[in-house]
Amino acid sequence: MSLKEIGEFGFIKKISRGCLIRPDTIVKAIGDDAAAFKSDPDQLTLITTDLLVERIHFLREAISGFDLGYKALAVNLSDIAAMGGTAREAFISIAIPDDCQLDYLDEIYNGIKDLAARYDVNVLGGDTTRSKIDLIINIVIQGVVPEAEILCRNAAQPADIICSTGFLGDSKAGLHLILNQITADSQVLKSLLEAHNLPQPHLREGRFLARQSGVHAAIDTSDGLSSDLGHIVEESRVGARLYADKIPISPSLKNFCARFDFDPVDYALTGGEDYTLLCTIAPERAEDILHEFEKTFKRPLFVIGEITADKQLTLLNPDGKTKPITPTGWDHFKAKDNE
Amino acid sequence: MSLKEIGEFGFIKKISRGCLIRPDTIVKAIGDDAAAFKSDPDQLTLITTDLLVERIHFLREAISGFDLGYKALAVNLSDIAAMGGTAREAFISIAIPDDCQLDYLDEIYNGIKDLAARYDVNVLGGDTTRSKIDLIINIVIQGVVPEAEILCRNAAQPADIICSTGFLGDSKAGLHLILNQITADSQVLKSLLEAHNLPQPHLREGRFLARQSGVHAAIDTSDGLSSDLGHIVEESRVGARLYADKIPISPSLKNFCARFDFDPVDYALTGGEDYTLLCTIAPERAEDILHEFEKTFKRPLFVIGEITADKQLTLLNPDGKTKPITPTGWDHFKAKDNE
């Protein structure tokens, strides 16, 4: 069955199945001019949106429909996580070129619904249309956060310790495999591919951090550690010192870097799309929070540096020497090698 | 100054100016992982989203940046209007191809901000990225509506009268001029172009209708009268009879149709993108509402037909003959001449 046979409205009916997993507060889901629902009156509303374009953010031939849908939703959920919020409703806009098969589209929605169900998120609406050449997906997430718990980029304070909720650099290694068409011939390489294609939004970690007193600023690592930390220090008008030997490198990335002769710390600093959370914590609260995090999630909250008053971003090497870090941010327009 | 010179973050700073026109309930606007704001606890939240793709929805060479931005926002505001809601926050995602000039982008945001300010809507966030070839704009609107006042598609009842808040078919005539590169050499043709490029969202009309008891169903005319009314009758499990001689045709469309030898009623039935509201009203409330509408808006609410129990969609001609209407909906995938 092709998209042309079932048409736009047939397609919408098809994808609507299984979208509403938490109907309690929903008045109108897919099928009217807008979705209508009750928002939690005691919490702030959060809204984030991300636009993914074929040949800029993904290569259709290099990613399964399932992984594409899953990842498109994950990167948006990660933004809600970075605010300390709970994700509630998702809206999917898709523009489909003629050569895109219905099976591939089905898999995109399967990937979206799979991840949405894990985090109790309804798919409440969106838009379905055509595109001339590139497949385009825009996702919007509505979420909530108690006002007193919101985590922002501009709240880091000098002497805060800087933490990451997971390993850094794995996603960039996975991207390297894809762009260089290297077969994932081992479990190690497969795990790096998975880090790139099926990132986990740290929503539970975000809620955990938001509830703790002493957690000041947070951001998700979408553009790369140096760039994302750059946003925190710029918005907070502070600086940061990272400890090169404390940056969490997964065993898989160590193995990959040894095999292909890359520097893992460079991968962690410049690689984007890890979707861990970076946060800054008042030093007197750090011990308790690190302990509680490990108890809750059965893995460490990695301490990777400290906030400074000097507005510099530096890397402290194990030999005691420091060097400046230039945020090599994922700027979609400035750099030439950003695809 | 080019986009490459100022970069993504320079561009975001540039477009952020003048986005926040109603700061009272906003905790975080552009510049964090998500926007955060207080939603009205006494009302339902509405969210709608539309994805516009170059060469499917618009031709960049045929529309000014200002008109494109204005229209992209207008079509979304129209969806909030059709639910009887008040629009509150807007989120703009844009994917920009390399050949798109900064001046054109500036004009897009000028068009968006111009219309947003007229309806008291903040531009609170979005996403900025690249595209290989086509310019892509996705807009999301968050709005509110009192639960008792929400207008849905599925609430039409037999014997309801069907009304339109404005003229129908003008936008299709404007599109005809563009696609056939006909110079708008008169005020008449200019007004049709304007109907296509600068549609007015009927937000005030939507709120007016939502507040009246007896207004049952509503939808905006985005796909064409036959198709949009088709949605109401299908969702409400009823039928409708339209009066051919009551369908509101503007003097400009009459003039255009006489000049180019088209049937104005056909234009009204099949033309999309008028963005008036269609609504159905209990017959006993019609007189009062029509009177009050005209008093408020200084123009009539046009009665165009009635809801029937028979699940048919028919057109009643002045000679007393009826013929079936086939909803020639704007299906993005099925038809071949839909561009």
Image (cartoon, coloured by chain):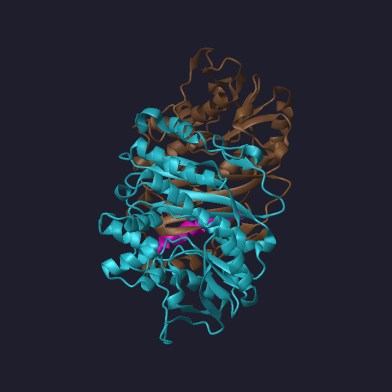
Chain colours: A brown, B cyan
Residue sitting at 46 percent across and 22 percent down? Answer: A326
- Give the magenta range: A102-118
- The number of numbered badges drawn on the structure is 0
* Magenta portion: prevailing SS class: helix
The image quadrant where one finds the C terminus of chain B is bottom left
Picture coordinates of residue A164, whole percent (x, y): 59, 32
In the rendered view, tell whether residue A120 sits above or below residue A10.
above
Q: Residue A324 versus residue B329: which sits nearer the camera?
A: B329
Q: Residue B24 versus residue A14: which sits nearer the camera?
A: B24
Q: Kindly tell me whether residue A58 is visible in this rendering.
A: no
In the rendered view, tell whether residue B176 sits above or below residue B234.
above
Residue sitting at 53 percent across and 67 percent down? Answer: B301
Picture coordinates of residue B9, whole percent (x, y): 46, 31
The image quadrant where one finds the N terminus of chain B is top left
Q: Is residue B212 left or right of residue B314?
A: right
The image quarter in which residue B43 lies: bottom right
Picture coordinates of residue B23, whole percent (x, y): 62, 38
Residue sitting at 38 percent across and 30 percent down? Answer: A334
In the rendered view, tell whether residue B129 sits above or below residue B254.
above
* Residue B328 part of the magenta-drawn span: no
